[in-house]
Image (cartoon, rainbow, N blue to C red):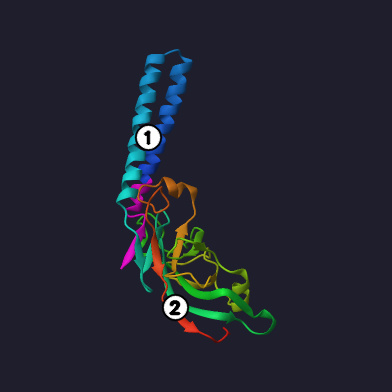
Amino acid sequence: MAEFMPHHAPLVVLTFLFTGLLLGLAGLLFVWTLAAGKRPLAAKVFVAGAVVGGLYAGTLLGFSLASEEKTLSAGQFKYFCEIDCHAAYTVTSARTARTLGQGPAQATADGMFYVVTLRTWFDEDTISSRRPKDLPLWPHPRLVSVVDQRGRRFYTSLAGQKAVAVSSVPMTHALQPGESYEAVLVFDLPADAAAPRLLVADWSLLSQLMIGHENSPMHKKIYFRLDPTDSSAAAR
C-alpha cells in the first residue's frame, strides 16, 4: 500500500500554475483598464478574477473536507511529488528506551525515547519521461514530528540524537534513481503520550495552496503507525 501527496500531482501543479497565471493576467488587465479610465471593463475583469479565485478556493476546500485521515504501517510508503518524480518515505523500525548512549553521552528521557528509523527512497518508476533517467534527486526538506492521541506534536530530541550518535544520512542528501538511505530520529515523549504516530510533512508554503495536499486548510493527514519494541538497554 502507498499513499501519494498529493494524488495526481502533475494535474494539481498544472491547475495551480494555470490559475495563478489567470489571476496574474486579470490583475494586470484590471490595473490597465483602471488607468485607461475604462471602469466598466475594469469591473468585469475584477468579477472574472474573483470567480476564478473563488472556484479554485472552493475546490481546494472541497477536497480538504472530503479527505480522510490515514495511518500507514511499517513498510508502507508515503510519496511526495518532486515535480517530475517522487520521493517515498517509510518507517523501517521503531523502538523505545528510557536511556540512550553510554558514559558522558548517555541521555535519560523525561518520559520515553522513541527511536524511529525512516527510509527515504527515490522510486525510479515515478520518473517522468521528460526527466533524464540518471539525474539525481535532492529531496525537498521535510518536517518530521510525532503526534499523539491528544493531538500534541513532538519534534526530535537534541539530547536523544546526540546519545544515539548514529551517522544517518541527511534527508536532503542526493539520491540516484532506485537508491535509498535511512535516518535515525529520536523523540522524547511524555509518559502519558498515547498512540503516537509519525508525521512526515512537506513544509513548503506553496503546498498550502495545492488542491488535495495535506497542508491545505482543513485537509486530513497521512501518518505512520509506530509499533515500537521495548528496550531497557542503552543504545550502542
Q: Residue at x 39, y 49 (%)?
A: 218
Residue named by callout 2: 228
Name which quarter of the figure residue 167 lies in: bottom right
Mark closer to the observer (2, 1): 2
Sequence order check, earlier mark of 2 and 1: 1
The three-letter amino acid code for the residue at tag 1 is Gly
Residue 213 visible, this angle: yes
Task: Determine whether, in the image, residue 99 is placed left or right of residue 4.
Answer: right
Name which quarter of the figure residue 168 lies in: bottom right
Find residue 4 and report its horizontal and vertical position in percent: 35, 59
Residue 165 visible, this angle: no
Q: In this view, does 107 lie above or below 19?
A: below
Q: Which residue is drawn at 40% across and 68% down?
A: 224
SS at mark 2 in the image: loop
Q: Residue at x 37, y 17 (%)?
A: 41
Task: Determine whether, in the image, residue 123 is placed left or right of residue 160.
Answer: left
Task: Name the quarter where the N terminus is drawn.
Answer: bottom left
Task: Name the quarter where the C terminus is drawn.
Answer: bottom right
The three-letter amino acid code for the residue at tag 2 is Pro
| Observer-nearest of 163 and 136 | 163
SS at mark 1 in the image: helix
| Observer-nearest of 176 and 186 | 186
Numbered range of the magenta stretch: 1-13
| Disc ID at residue 33 | none
Residue named by callout 1: 53
Find residue 163 and report its horizontal and vertical position in percent: 62, 77
Find residue 191 and report its horizontal and vertical position in percent: 51, 73
| Observer-nearest of 75 and 223 | 223
Q: Residue at x 44, y 49 (%)?
A: 207
Q: Which residue lies furthest to the front in this view?
A: 192
